[in-house]
């Protein structure tokens, strides 16, 4: 018999309900002749004793009877409490031994202890949720944390309704275990919100808000999962080869993403996204195994959507362009440009210089507009690595202006313009790639916040 149970362990567990664990366990054991009808009847009598005692608590011993609906709810609570204890056993065989040797009252008492411990644990988890919360104006997110979850603890009834999930949980998780109930559901929910908050904390909150605005300008009122949107966009950034922690996806990025994904088989697409998820964890130095598992499970859920958006040419709906508010955008007004005669004279003077230091001095003293700087870089008066030296002499904002000027929604695009323009575009890319990640990210961020 023991070998039979061991061999059937996996099959049995697949038949058990997470929400109605105790009832489904008895059904599986009886249908496989592991509990006789006599043993089932004995269990039912023990359950009636616990029900009678609990009803006494419910009526404060003023009555031994209650409405049928109330009795049914109390019995469901008893089942839930028993199931909570039996779920903690490592094997079905252990559960059978406990039922046969310890009795239902013993299991119920142990289940009550677990319930109380889990309630205390969840109240601690709520404190962590509040400590790690995102300062994002999404009303479902705010209301769930500030009102909905605290209401659960105010109304949760361990003795008479442990199977219920009171409160108001409106904010959707990326992966929501709806098959759970009661304190188990709350425990799972809180742990996942903490994981989601932890992941989002790796990114600038202003960028997250810009991402949500890019997704839908009415994001404050929508039931959306912030973590999944952030994860998806950052996956896109990883696939385009961007460093740092920017969430920005441009139109050009989506063209590139489509080009590398549209001809892949299902297996090839899964492999590409899976490798990007692994690189993502390395990029952010994520070592929390629970968070890594949660990211991978969410990525699996994202995959079918990616496939559909590729086929329908609507990647903009999943890889989102950030929407910066007017207050986040710097309106750049260019300086006064040189007249044609003065410009020709300066470029000839630059061309005649044998030292790059002299060329830099002329540029810094005579060029006072972005238009003239761009024209000088394209005027065949600067050569080879002189470009790098000149870029080094410019400040970060001037470099950001050049990046903005060359981007056209595709950062570091070097494939358009005249040959002279292509040359300095390429040298600018080389210069940026030689910077450390933090400096490069800062310059790109500045460029994305400029409106030329």
Image: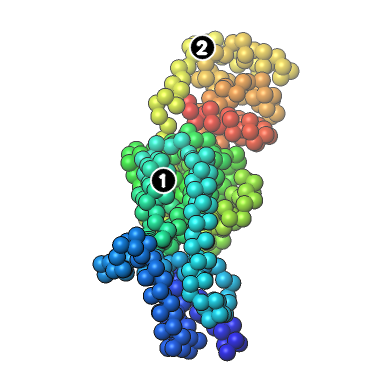
Which is nearer the N-term, disc 2 or disc 1?
1
Near-viewer residue (163 or 342): 163
Tell me the mark number nearer the camera, choosing from 2 and 1: 1
Q: Residue at x 51, y 43 (%)?
A: 127
The quadrant of the rendering that contains the C terminus is top left
Residue 346 x/y as whole percent: 60, 12
Residue 25 x/y as whole percent: 46, 77
Q: Which residue is mark 1?
A: 150
Q: Residue at x 63, y 20 (%)?
A: 394
Mark 1, secondary structure of its residue: helix
The structure's colour scheme is rainbow
**What separation in Å lies between label 2 and label 1 (alpha carbons)?**
66 Å
Residue 310 x/y as whole percent: 42, 55
Q: Quadrant of residue 350?
A: top right
Residue 17 x/y as whole percent: 43, 71
Q: Is 380 placed above or below 311 here?
A: above
Mark 2, secondary structure of its residue: loop
- Residue 340's disc is none
Q: Residue at x 54, y 31 (%)?
A: 445
Badge 1: residue crowd in 10 Å (few <14, some 14–19, many ≥20): some
Q: Which residue is mark 2?
A: 338
Q: Is 316 placed above or below 95 here?
A: above
């Amino acid at each position: 018999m023991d070998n039979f149970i061991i061999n059937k362990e996996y099959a049995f567990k697949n038949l058990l309900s997470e929400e109605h664990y105790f009832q489904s366990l008895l059904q599986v054991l009886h249908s496989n002749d592991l509990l006789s009808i006599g043993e089932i009847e004995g269990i039912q009598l023990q359950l009636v004793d616990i029900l009678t005692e609990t009803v006494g608590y419910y009526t404060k011993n003023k009555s031994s009877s209650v409405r049928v609906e109330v009795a049914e709810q109390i019995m469901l609570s008893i089942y839930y409490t028993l199931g909570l204890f039996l779920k903690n056993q490592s094997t079905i065989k252990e559960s059978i031994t406990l039922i046969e040797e310890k009795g239902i009252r013993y299991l119920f008492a142990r289940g009550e202890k677990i319930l109380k411990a889990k309630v205390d644990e969840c109240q601690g988890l709520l404190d962590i949720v509040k400590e790690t919360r995102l300062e994002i104006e999404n009303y479902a997110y705010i209301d769930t944390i500030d009102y909905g979850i605290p209401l659960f603890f105010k109304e949760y009834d361990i003795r008479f309704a442990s199977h219920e999930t009171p409160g108001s949980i409106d904010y959707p998780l990326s992966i929501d275990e709806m098959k759970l109930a009661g304190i188990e559901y709350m425990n799972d929910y809180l742990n996942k919100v903490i994981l989601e908050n932890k992941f989002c904390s790796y990114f600038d909150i202003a960028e997250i808000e810009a991402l949500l605005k890019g997704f839908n300008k009415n994001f404050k009122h929508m039931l959306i999962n912030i973590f999944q949107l952030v994860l998806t966009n950052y996956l896109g950034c990883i696939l385009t080869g961007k460093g740092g922690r920017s969430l920005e996806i441009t139109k050009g990025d989506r063209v590139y993403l489509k080009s590398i994904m549209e001809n892949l088989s299902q297996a090839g697409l899964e492999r590409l996204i899976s490798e990007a998820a692994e690189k993502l964890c390395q990029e952010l130095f994520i070592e929390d195994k629970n968070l890594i598992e949660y990211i991978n499970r969410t990525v699996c859920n994202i995959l079918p959507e990616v496939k559909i958006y590729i086929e329908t040419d609507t990647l903009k709906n999943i890889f989102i362009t950030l929407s910066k508010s007017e207050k986040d955008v710097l309106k750049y007004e260019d300086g006064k440009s040189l007249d044609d005669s003065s410009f020709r004279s300066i470029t000839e003077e630059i061309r005649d210089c044998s030292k790059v230091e002299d060329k830099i001095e002329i540029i810094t003293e005579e060029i006072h507009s972005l238009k003239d700087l761009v024209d000088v870089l394209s005027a065949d008066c600067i050569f080879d690595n002189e470009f790098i030296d000149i870029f080094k002499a410019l400040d970060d904002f001037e470099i950001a202006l050049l990046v903005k000027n060359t981007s056209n929604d595709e950062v570091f695009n070097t494939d358009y313009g005249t040959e002279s323009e292509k040359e300095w575009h390429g040298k600018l890319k080389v210069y940026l790639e030689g910077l450390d990640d933090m400096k490069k990210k800062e310059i790109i961020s500045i460029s994305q916040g400029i409106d030329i």
